[in-house]
Amino acid sequence: MHTEKAKILEMIQSGKITAAEGLELLEALDPSGHEATIVPEKTDRFLRIRITKGQQNKVNVNIPLSLVKVATKFAGIGMKMIPDQARLEMQNKGMDLSEINFDELAALIDQGLSDGKLVDIDTDDSPDGPTKIEIYIE
């Protein structure tokens, strides 16, 4: 039965089934009526992405490190939330956020990446004020 439970957990982790569907499957494996309990990994560490332009926050993303692997699948969606004008300005200055390799970032976090800034970029040539990009673990 242990391997069946492991397979269900792998399917949840890979996104093939939802956590609710996984719980139903786990409960079906335990006909004794004992309630299956899934304890989420506790974390108080986050991958934080902040982009400000002048005094205005443009992007503010906080991702629990335990979800970074899942988030890599949705990174493209998150990058689309950056306004086109801001993305073009950053690309013109050599800052192409689409080149961030989130799979590699997840591997580094698994290897024990320490807290601190991963990316810290400041520009100050926009009429709307400076643009600041910060990606850090906290």
Image (cartoon, rainbow, N blue to C red):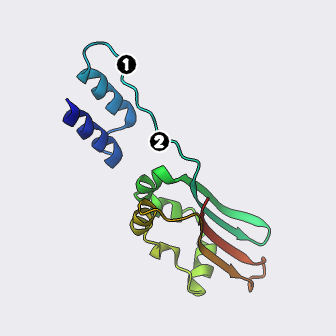
Q: Where is residue 118 in the image (x, y as percent from the top left)?
A: 56, 71
Residue 85 seen in render = no
Circle 2 sits in a helix, a strand or a loop, which is it?
loop
Q: Which of marks 2 and 1 is nearer the N terminus?
A: 1
Looking at the image, residue 24 sits to the left or right of residue 80; the answer is left
Instruction: Give the quadrant of the C terminus.
Output: bottom right
> Which residue is pictured at 64% across the width and 70% down the height?
134
Residue 123 seen in render = yes
Quick check: 65 above or below 82?
above
Q: Residues within 10 Å of mark 2 (few under 14, many from 20)?
A: few
Looking at the image, residue 69 sits to the left or right of residue 87; the answer is left
Looking at the image, residue 95 sits to the left or right of residue 70; the answer is right
Of 86 and 60, nearer the camera is 60
Quick check: 61 above or below 44?
below
- Residue underneath mark 1: 35
Of 38 and 16, nearer the camera is 38
> Which residue is pictured at 64% across the width and 78% down the height?
121
Amino acid at circle 1: Glu
Which of the 4 image quarters holds residue 35? top left
Looking at the image, residue 107 sits to the left or right of residue 81; the answer is left
- Residue underneath mark 2: 41
> Which residue is pictured at 60% across the width and 86% down the height?
93
Which of the 4 image quarters holds residue 124? bottom right
Q: Where is residue 69 in the image (x, y as percent from the top left)?
A: 41, 56
> Which residue is pictured at 60% across the width and 57% down the height?
61
